Image (cartoon, rainbow, N blue to C red):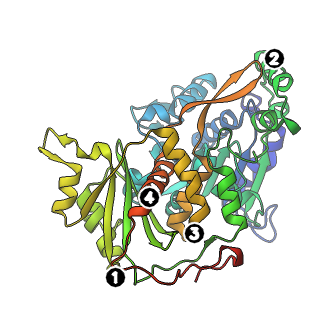
């Protein structure tokens, strides 16, 4: 590796394995017995994780005519990608004449190319059509969902292709961290980089690091160790329902659940810009059972109902043809008429055959307290879709402000990729008494919280 491409010493072994894989030089008699498939580069702030990968990939793209996909969970524009970082590194290394920095891609004179795409639902079809990717870089991988990973890994399917993940671990059950880093297989390399491993660690960051260490008065300095040492948090800072979800798991109330044909399945929705979420719930006696959860991006109510034309989202009626549907509960602002179509969200859903009800507006804190109370009377299925909801519930958080005396929560809660799941759960709590069936259920089919058993 040229001196101008100096990277942390801890990455040298991983880089050699990566190059041997691309060159097809792995085998029983070689330095590396099996090709590298997943390269995990994790650690805290100031560790030069992203800068190092950018340097490695620019150097590889100069010598190999390969396509490199740079991705992340959500990318609404090229500005949210690592495009600028790669561009800066190319200039820093004096390679501007070799690379053509186009508007949405970077092309090398030898035929190499950097491509950029997000992994959220709106980019799935595009990603699946991407061919001949030899290297994939997933930035901020701690927020990658299970669904995104399930789409990504078979998409990067060229012989000897490698997926590289960079992130600062947040919780131990972050999908990338749990799937690859905690118990790495023979084709996985895990590298932990922190500030002390960074050959370019600047003095200004050293002052910030020391200030952060002095300021953190928490037991075990968990916040400092997360930010600077790359250690997992016991819970996301400011998490609203972390304790309740942990208790739910301890009590065995996250478990396999089938829908009960004797009761109605109700839909509780949250609506946001470009996204809608839907919880599928039943209620027997005082017990609420969440059996499904949907997140749809840039979709219509018709697609929620009947699925999209490509078949990637089957829709509620086609995916669950045997369900006896109850009501669809929608936020109060769904009554607003769209000036373009002259119809409210309620009216559109009613025309599609649903019976709609309004979720009353009771204020953010009251919503949250209702959600907190619901945890005492609920089971949640352990299926993949409900796993996405649980991930939201573990990570939905208050905004947190640093003060001289420590961190304090501020209102309102964060609006991020986890907030819609958290809000739809709270809405479920608010309308729990309205999740009625055709007739009273004499026996509670989910008897006995104490036994931890859901019939």
Tell me the mark number nearer the camera, choosing from 3 and 1.
3
Question: Badge 4 is on which residue?
Answer: 131
The 10 Å Cα crowd at callout 4, few under 14, some 14 to 19, many 20 or more, is few
Q: CA distance from mark 1 to mark 4?
A: 38 Å
**Real-space Cα distance between discs 3 and 4?**
42 Å
Question: Hey, which quadrant is residue 355 in on the image?
Answer: bottom left
Residue sitting nearer the eye, 397 or 332: 332
Position in image of residue 117 (x %, y %)? 45, 45
Above-or-below relation of 206 to 126: above
For label 1, the residue is 322
Q: Quadrant of the N terminus?
A: top right
- Quadrant of image for the C terminus: bottom right
Q: Residues within 10 Å of mark 3 (few under 14, many from 20)?
A: many
Q: Earlier in the sequence, mark 3 or mark 1?
A: 1
In the displayed structure image, the side of residue 30 where residue 428 appears, left or right: left
Badge 3 is on which residue? 379
Secondary structure found at label 1: loop
């Amino acid at each position: 590796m040229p001196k101008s491409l100096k990277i942390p010493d801890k990455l040298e072994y991983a880089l050699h394995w990566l190059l041997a894989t691309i060159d097809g030089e792995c085998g029983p008699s070689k330095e590396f017995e099996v090709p590298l498939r997943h390269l995990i580069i994790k650690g805290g702030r100031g560790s030069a994780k992203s800068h190092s990968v950018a340097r490695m990939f620019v150097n590889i793209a100069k010598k190999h005519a390969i396509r490199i996909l740079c991705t992340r969970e959500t990318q609404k524009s090229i500005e949210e990608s690592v495009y600028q970082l790669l561009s800066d590194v190319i200039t820093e290394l004096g390679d501007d004449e070799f690379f053509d920095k186009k508007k949405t891609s970077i092309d090398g004179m030898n035929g190499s190319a950097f491509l950029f795409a997000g992994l959220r639902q709106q980019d799935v079809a595009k990603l699946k059509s991407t061919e001949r990717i030899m290297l994939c870089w997933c930035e901020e991988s701690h927020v990658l969902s299970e669904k995104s990973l399930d789409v990504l890994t078979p998409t990067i399917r060229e012989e000897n292709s490698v997926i590289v993940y960079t992130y600062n671990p947040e919780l131990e059950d972050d999908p990338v961290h749990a799937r690859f880093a905690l118990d790495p297989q023979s084709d996985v390399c895990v590298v932990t980089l922190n500030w002390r491993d960074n050959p370019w660690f600047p003095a200004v960051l050293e002052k910030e690091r020391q200030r952060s260490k002095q300021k953190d008065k928490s037991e075990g300095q968990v916040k400092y160790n997360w930010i600077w040492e790359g250690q997992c948090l016991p819970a996301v800072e400011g998490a609203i329902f972390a304790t309740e979800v942990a208790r739910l798991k301890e009590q065995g109330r996250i478990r396999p659940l089938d829908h009960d044909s004797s009761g109605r399945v109700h839909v509780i929705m949250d609506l946001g810009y470009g996204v809608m979420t839907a919880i599928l719930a039943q209620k027997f006696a005082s017990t609420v059972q969440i059996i499904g959860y949907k997140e749809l991006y840039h979709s219509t109510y018709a697609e929620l109902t009947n699925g999209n034309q490509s078949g990637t989202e089957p829709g509620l009626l086609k995916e669950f043809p045997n369900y006896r549907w109850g009501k669809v509960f929608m936020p109060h602002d769904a009554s607003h008429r769209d000036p373009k179509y002259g119809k409210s969200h309620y009216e559109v859903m009613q025309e599609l055959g649903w019976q709609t009800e309004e979720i009353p507006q009771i204020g953010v804190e009251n919503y949250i307290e209702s959600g907190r109370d619901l945890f005492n009377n609920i089971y949640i299925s352990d299926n993949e879709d409900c796993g996405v909801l649980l991930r939201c519930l573990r990570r939905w958080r208050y905004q947190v402000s640093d003060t001289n005396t420590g961190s304090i929560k501020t209102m309102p809660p964060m609006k991020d990729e986890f907030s819609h799941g958290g809000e739809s759960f709270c809405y479920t709590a608010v309308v729990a008494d309205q999740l009625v069936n055709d007739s009273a259920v004499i026996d509670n089919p989910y008897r006995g919280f104490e036994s931890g058993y859901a019939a």
